[in-house]
Image (cartoon, rainbow, N blue to C red):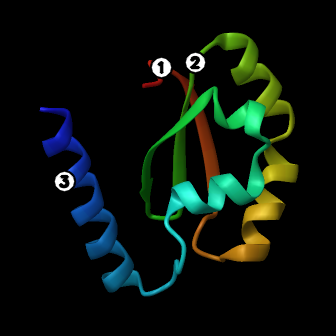
Amino acid sequence: MEEIKETILQVMQRLETKQKGAVRDNPEVLLKKTFTKKELSHIKVNYLKKGILSIGVDSSAWLYHLDLQKEKLLSKIRKKTNQIKEIRFYVGEIK
């Protein structure tokens, strides 16, 4: 079931990229270039839609930490692509 979910996510990302024509890197690649290794172990991309990057965080402590750095992270991402306008963090299960 997880394989189907990942396949659908990849197809949707490709379709959105073709329609909007902007992001050269997928969200996971952008995150690897933006976040530290420690931060990456606590987050997972949920979706990228209409300029909003939704990121799941494994605890409220990490949510708070990343929320404090939101503007700095967003400016780093904007240097790489102009498609992402906003980052939204939420507490959720990270696999």
Q: Quadrant of residue 21?
A: bottom left
Q: Is residue 4 left or right of residue 20?
A: left
Answer whether labels 1 and 3 touch (C-beta < 8 Å).
no
Q: Is residue 32 above or below residue 69?
A: below
Left or right, 30 with reference to 3: right
Q: Nearer the viewer, mark 1 or mark 3?
A: 3
**Secondary element type, mark 3:** helix
Taking the spot 32% from the left edge, 83% from the top edge, the residue there is 19
31 up-or-down from 23: above or below: above
Residue contact between numbered discs 1 and 2, judged by CB atoms under 8 Å: yes
Sequence order check, earlier mark of 1 and 3: 3
Residue nearest the viewer, comparing 93 with 70: 93
Task: Rate crowding at label 1 as few (under 14), some (14 to 19) or many (20 or more) other CA atoms within 10 Å.
Answer: some
Q: Earlier in the sequence, mark 2 or mark 3?
A: 3
Q: How many angstroms separate mark 1 from mark 3 (CA)?
A: 20 Å
Question: Circle 2 is placed at which residue position?
Answer: 58
* Label 3 Cα neighbours within 10 Å, binned few <14 / some 14-19 / many ≥20: few
Residue at x-position 54% and y-position 52%: 53
> What secondary structure is marked by label 2?
loop
Name the residue tied to disc 1: 92
What residue is at 57 percent from the left and 73 percent from the top?
A: 83
Q: Quadrant of residue 61?
A: top right
Residue density around tag 2, few if under 14, some if 14–19, many if 20 or more, within 10 Å = some
Say whether disc 1 or disc 2 marks the residue closer to the N-terminus: 2
Instruction: Measuring from the top left, give residue 43's x and y in whole percent.
Output: 59, 32
For the residues bearing labels 2 and 3, Cβ distance under 8 angstroms: no
Q: Which residue is mark 3?
A: 8
Label 1 vs label 2: CA separation? Answer: 6 Å
Mark 1 falls on what kind of element?
A: loop
